[in-house]
Image (tube, grey):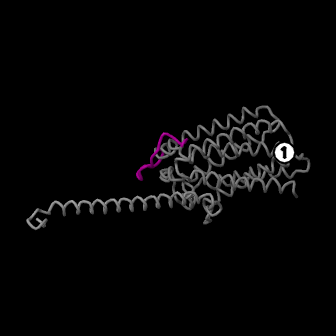
Amino acid sequence: MSTYGLPLLYVLLLWWFSTGVVLYLDGLPRRTHRWSLLGATAVALLALFGLTLGSREVSVIGAFVAFTGAVLVWGWLELSFLTGIVTGPRKHSCAQSCAGWRHFLHAVEAILYHELALIGGAALIAVATWDRPNQVGIWTFLILWGMRASAKLNLFLGVRNLSEDFLPEQLQYLKSFFSRKPMNLLFPVSATVSTVIGTLLLQVALADDTTAFEVAAFTLLATLMGLAVLEHWFLVLPVPANELWRWGLRSRTMDKRFKAWRGDELKLEIAERTALSRSRCAGRNWIANMTPSRGGWRRG
C-alpha cells in the first residue's frame, strides 16, 4: 500500500503547501516581492539542477526528484506572475462594454509575458532532460501548464466560483476578464479529457508488469492530474476552496491591517499637528491684539 500511498500523500502535501507559500508571498507588501522572487529564483535554479540530475536516474528517488524539481520551477513562474512582475503589456481592466474577440485579445495581452515565460520554462526543462530515461519532470510541467491554461479559459468563459480571493491587490484588474456563470461549454470537455488522462496514468501505475520507477512516476502524475481535475470542479461547485489555504491568504489580511494602522497613525499625527498649529495661531492672535496702556497691557 505504501508503494502507492507515499507518492499520493507526497503530491497532496506538496500541492497544498507550495500553493499556500506562493499565496502568502504574493500577498505581502510590494516592497518584499523582489526579495521573495530573488529567493524563489535561487530555489528554482537548484530545482532545475536537481531535475537534470534526477532525469538520469530510473529509480523511485529519481522520479520524486524530477517531479519536485518541475513543481518548484512552476512555483517560481507562478510567483513571478502573482507578484505582478511578469504579467503582460496590459496593466488595466477592460470596460464593461468590451466583448467578443476584442475582449479575448485584451485578456491575452494581460498575461502575455507570463505565457511566454511558461513556454520558456517548458523548453528549458525539455532541453535539460532531453534524451534522458526519466521524463517525469517535463510531463509534470506539461500537466501543470495544460490544466492551468484550461482553468484560465474556463474563468474567461464563465464559471460559478471565480476565486477572486486568490488574486492579490496588484492583479485585481484581471477580474474584468472573468465571467460568472453556472458553467460554460468548455468545462465538460476540460473535465472529461483531464479525467480520462488521469485514469490512463493511473492504469499504468496499477498494471502488473510495471517497475518500481514506473509505479512511483505514474502515481505522482496521476495524483497531480486528479488534483487538477478537483481544482476544475472547485470552479463550478459551491465549495469554499479558499478555506484550504486560509493560512496562505493571511498575509493579505496582515497587510491590510498594517495599512489601516498606518492610516490611523497618520490621521492622528495630522490631527495633533493641526491642533498644535491652531493653538500657536491663537497664541499669536492674542499677543497681536494686546496694546500698551499706562497701567500695563490691555486687549486692543
Identity of the residue drawn at 16% across and 60% down = 288
Amino acid type of the residue that numbered disc 1 sits on in the rendered structure: Ile
Report crowding for label 1: few under 14, some 14 to 19, many 20 or more residues within 10 A (C-alpha): some
In the structure shown, which secondary structural element does the residue marked by tag 1 occupy? Answer: helix
Identity of the residue drawn at 76% across and 32% down = 130
What stretch of residues is rendered in magenta?
85-101
Quadrant placement of the N terminus: bottom right
Camera sees residue 162: no
> Magenta segment: does it hold 49?
no
Identity of the residue drawn at 70% across and 43% down = 141
279, above or below 138, in the image: below
Q: Which residue is mark 1?
A: 61
Q: Is 247 or 8 nearer to us in this picture? A: 247
196, above or below 126, in the image: below
The x and y percentages for residue 47 are 72, 41
Identity of the residue drawn at 63% across and 64% down = 243
Quadrant hosting residue 185? bottom right
Quadrant placement of the C terminus: bottom left
Task: Identify the main secondary structure in magenta.
Answer: loop
38 lies left or right of 270: right
128 lies left or right of 59: left
7 lies left or right of 149: right
The x and y percentages for residue 122 are 67, 38
Which residue is situated farthest in the right direction here? 209
